[in-house]
């Protein structure tokens, strides 16, 4: 270790780990990141197949409005800036039943008009929904400091900025998306309300997600997820950080109740003054350190699987002609698809034609997603290698058939590029049950949130999407910053970074 600087080692080179690395360097620490994969980025990832690029993360990036604190964090880590180009999209998603469809447009007035035209009998409920989405536009993820470090003045400022959110929580915080749908007479609108987020999600989650789009705070950076991860990694290295890829960590070394460094899979030990874990918490507690150290509230969530479900998916990517007129994201009914003991009759297709860098000229990439959960992950996990490959091939073919049936113009003009399962996320990212988000917040249960510290182990801090529901990129990037602020607070230094 350097004689002049204290050393921070970060386990995991995803968005949380890269963010922690950048803030640690800016705070004056010698900093190294150890990432098990050959490419940094974690779940903020994309890959190439047959000359096409498959993007696998950013459906929208919360924090693209320069007026928000989160934008400043994204800019600081090198993800976006004033010159970032975004995709030109006009809608959140479209839901279809038979020949009828309805769209949540980024233009709320247009959405309101269309919904009322489709179902005049729902006008009052539609107007209320639209009004509360407008209220939810004020929702911003606190990014200056962790909640437990906030003072009265911080909470007052936070409250001022999100003055309308209590209205949203009061009206939609006690019901889930399925129950929200039941407020409408129209079967199509009912279905739309539980299409994008699983039905057990709290309803306010849908309103906040939609409001992110309508407010202009949820744009999609061009070039995709992998390009953004690589920009952040370059920022880390440009500040003097050392990024070790293809470097799996076997365990975090603990001596006399203090994190003293890490041991790699090859047995080598690297010493550090502080360790930040930026990996899946199920992997941290049980693989890198003993599970007995897991915070009580987190341990409870892993036990109460029905109350804190996860979201993952079976996904298939295709090459099509860019003349394909499919919506950006569209949900539709289909003949039953069997996965293990569960049957699915609704899938989504997303058209990535808005980003010309993903495909050769005249072509585009589309992706289908069959939303999966804990039970589905366990099914995929139960298969041996041959069964797994056969099941993946079967399901891919059946999904292709359903897509062509829904969009006949794709007959003979759709090429399978790749397919991946919930197990893929676990294999590459150690993601608990293949989840690509944190725990789902269901009605009647507290939102998951815990301090990024480990009781009983000094100088070990936690970053990553699991520290606060619903997870995702915003939580990942701010948690990296927060982990470094906790170190600074321990040292009685300013946390204003």
Image (spheres, rainbow, N blue to C red):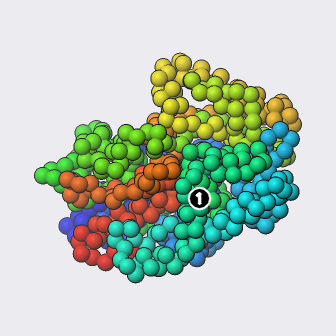
Where is 430 relative to 261, above or below? above
Which residue appears farthest toward the bottom when viewing the image?
A: 153
On screen, residue 287 versus residue 321, left or right, reads left
Q: Can residue 50 be seen at all in this image of the molecule?
A: no
Which sits in the foreground, 168 or 234? 168
The foreground one among 208 and 495 is 208
Residue at (41%, 61%) from the top-left corner?
479
Picture quarter with the N terminus? bottom left
Camera-side residue: 433 or 27?
Answer: 433
Q: Position of residue 433 (x, y in %)?
A: 46, 37
Residue at the limit of the structure toward the left, as seen here: 256
Q: Nearer the viewer, residue 102 or 420?
A: 102
- State the residue position of label 1: 172
Q: Residue at x 81, y 47 (%)?
A: 101
Where on the picture, by quarter, is residue 82?
Answer: bottom right
Residue in the image at 43% along x and 54% along y:
446
Q: How many marks?
A: 1
Residue at the spot 68% in from the left edge and 49% down from the top edge: 181
The kind of secondary structure element at disc 1 is helix
* Residue 497 located left or right of residue 7: right
Which image quarter holds the C terminus?
bottom left
For this view, does 423 lie left or right of residue 320? left
Q: Is residue 181 left or right of residue 226?
A: right
Residue 379's spot in the image, x, y percent?
A: 51, 26
How crowded is the residue under tag 1: few (<14 C-alpha within 10 Å), some, or many (20+)? many
User: Percent from the top left, x then y, of residue 31?
Assistant: 33, 61
Q: Position of residue 454 (x, y in %)?
A: 26, 54
Q: Quadrant of residue 106?
A: bottom right
């Amino acid at each position: 270790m350097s004689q002049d600087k204290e050393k921070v080692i970060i386990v995991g080179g995803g968005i949380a780990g890269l963010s922690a690395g950048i803030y640690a360097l800016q705070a004056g620490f010698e900093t190294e990141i150890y990432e098990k994969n050959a490419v940094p980025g974690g779940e903020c990832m994309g890959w190439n197949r047959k000359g096409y690029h498959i993007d696998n993360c950013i459906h929208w990036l919360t924090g693209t409005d320069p007026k928000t604190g989160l934008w400043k964090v994204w800019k600081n880590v090198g993800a976006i800036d004033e010159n970032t180009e975004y995709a030109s999209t006009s809608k959140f998603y479209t839901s279809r039943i038979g020949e009828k469809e309805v769209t949540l447009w980024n233009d709320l007035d247009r959405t309101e008009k269309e919904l009322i035209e489709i179902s005049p009998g729902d006008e009052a409920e539609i107007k209320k929904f639209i009004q509360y989405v407008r209220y939810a536009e004020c929702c911003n993820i606190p990014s200056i400091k962790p909640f437990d470090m906030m003072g009265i003045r911080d909470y007052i400022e936070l409250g001022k900025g999100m003055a309308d959110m209590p209205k949203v929580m009061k009206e939609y915080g006690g019901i889930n998306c399925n129950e929200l749908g039941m407020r409408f007479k129209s079967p199509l609108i009912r279905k739309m309300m539980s299409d994008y987020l699983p039905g057990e999600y709290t309803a306010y989650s849908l309103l906040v997600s939609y409001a992110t789009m309508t407010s202009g705070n949820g744009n999609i950076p061009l070039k995709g997820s992998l390009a953004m991860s690589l920009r952040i990694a370059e920022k880390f290295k440009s500040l003097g950080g050392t990024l070790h890829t293809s470097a799996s960590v076997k365990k975090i070394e603990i001596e006399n109740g203090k994190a003293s460094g890490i041991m790699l899979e090859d047995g080598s030990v690297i010493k550090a003054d502080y360790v930040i874990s930026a990996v899946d918490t199920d992997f941290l507690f049980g693989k890198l350190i003993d599970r007995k150290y897991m915070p009580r509230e987190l341990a409870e969530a892993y036990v109460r699987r029905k109350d804190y479900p996860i979201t993952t998916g079976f996904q298939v990517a295709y090459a099509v002609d860019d003349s394909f007129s499919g919506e950006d994201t569209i949900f539709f009914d289909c003949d039953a698809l069997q996965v293990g003991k569960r049957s699915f009759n609704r899938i989504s297709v997303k058209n990535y034609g808005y980003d010309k860098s993903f495909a050769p000229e005249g072509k585009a990439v589309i992706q289908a997603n069959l939303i999966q959960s804990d039970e589905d992950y366990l099914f995929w996990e139960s298969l041996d290698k041959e069964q797994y490959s056969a099941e993946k091939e079967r399901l891919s073919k059946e999904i292709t058939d359903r897509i062509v049936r829904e969009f006949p113009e794709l007959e003979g003009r759709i090429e399978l590029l790749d397919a991946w399962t919930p197990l893929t996320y676990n294999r590459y990212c150690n993601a608990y049950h293949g989840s690509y988000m944190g725990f789902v917040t269901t009605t009647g249960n507290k939102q998951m949130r815990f301090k990024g510290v480990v009781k009983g182990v000094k100088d070990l801090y936690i970053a990553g999407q699991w520290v606060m529901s619903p997870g995702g990129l915003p939580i990942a990037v701010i948690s990296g910053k927060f982990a470094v602020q906790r170190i600074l607070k321990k040292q009685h230094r300013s946390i204003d970074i």
